[in-house]
Image (tube, rainbow, N blue to C red):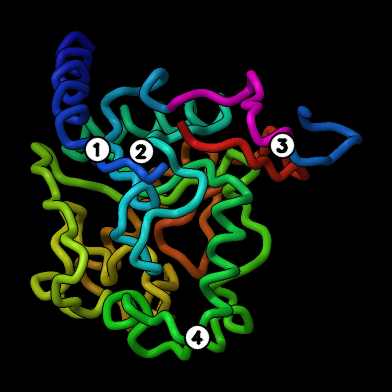
Amino acid sequence: MPRLAAALRGLAVAAAALMTVTTAPSPAAGAAHRAASPATMPEEFVALREVDPTIVQEMRYATPHTFMGVPVDGYRRPTCLLTRDAARALHRAQRAFVRRGYTLKVYDCYRPQRAVDHFVRWATDLGDQRMKAEFYPREDKAKLFDDGYIAAKSGHSRGSTVDLTLVRLPAVPTRPYVPGEPLTSCYGPKAERFPDNSLDMGTGFDCFDTLAHTLDPRIHGRQLRNRLLLKHGLERAGFVNLPEEWWHFTFQPETFPDTYFDFPVR
């Protein structure tokens, strides 16, 4: 155990160096089932780095490298916030993955309702397709609602859902996205996709394509093994995967199963 503790301490330092630093411009669960005040973070929430600083954070929605091409409303800092139960469960999963030579990396955690509203506004603007070539090459933007890629509510807003992947140790940084750079398909060969230090999962994060379904039969070999490694490791810690997205997991039971929050990420 001393060796694992030392490895985790070293990984915490490395994870801090790998965090994305680009920032965006500038009631508790129960019978009420209402969203909290925009300025209020319940005491049941915590910053992930306070529970496990070794988990790499690449908080995409605080940067312009999103399917919209701009930072998302409500992400004032690139910080992963989660309910304390979910954060502790991620910590348990991380310890097991580190023993096997991997680290978790989170792309998104708690997501304020204002961010979801931003997605909805963007999805109705059919003239804005600047990121289509990377995130939805084969998807008609007019069908994003019908096909389930965009919705008016998100489980992320309840605080126990996280989007994440695995990175082999020692982790190296993913270079930042440069707005306006040439785009490549999120489902192409890994060497041709936007560079990501993640294991090859068959698609990139937020790929609006059926290839992103966790058990899509066209995914096999190493890519399938990597998806199952992530899935099984998180399931052992109490998370449930969304079958349509290999990166999307919700800790069960949720602390706030019926409450959608809107306080900003900061």
For the question of whether residue 235 can be seen, the reply is no
Q: Earlier in the sequence, mark 2 or mark 1?
A: 1
Mark whose residue sits in front, 1 or 4: 4
Residue 78: assigned label: 2
Quadrant position of the N terminus in the picture = top left
Disc 1 residue type (three-letter):
Val
Residue tagged 4: 126
Badge 3 marks a residue whose secondary structure is: loop
Amino acid type shown at disc 2: Pro
Q: Nearer the viewer, residue 218 or 85?
A: 85
Upstream in sequence: badge 3 or badge 2: 2
Helix, strand or loop at label 2? It is: loop
Q: Amino acid at mark 4?
A: Leu
Three-letter residue code for mark 3 = Phe
Dot 3 alpha-carbon crowd within 10 angstroms: few under 14, some 14 to 19, many 20 or more: many
Of residues 208 and 39, which is closer to you in this image?
Answer: 39
Residue on which disc 1 sits:
21
Q: On residue 256, which mark appears?
A: 3
Q: Which residues are magenta?
A: 36-47
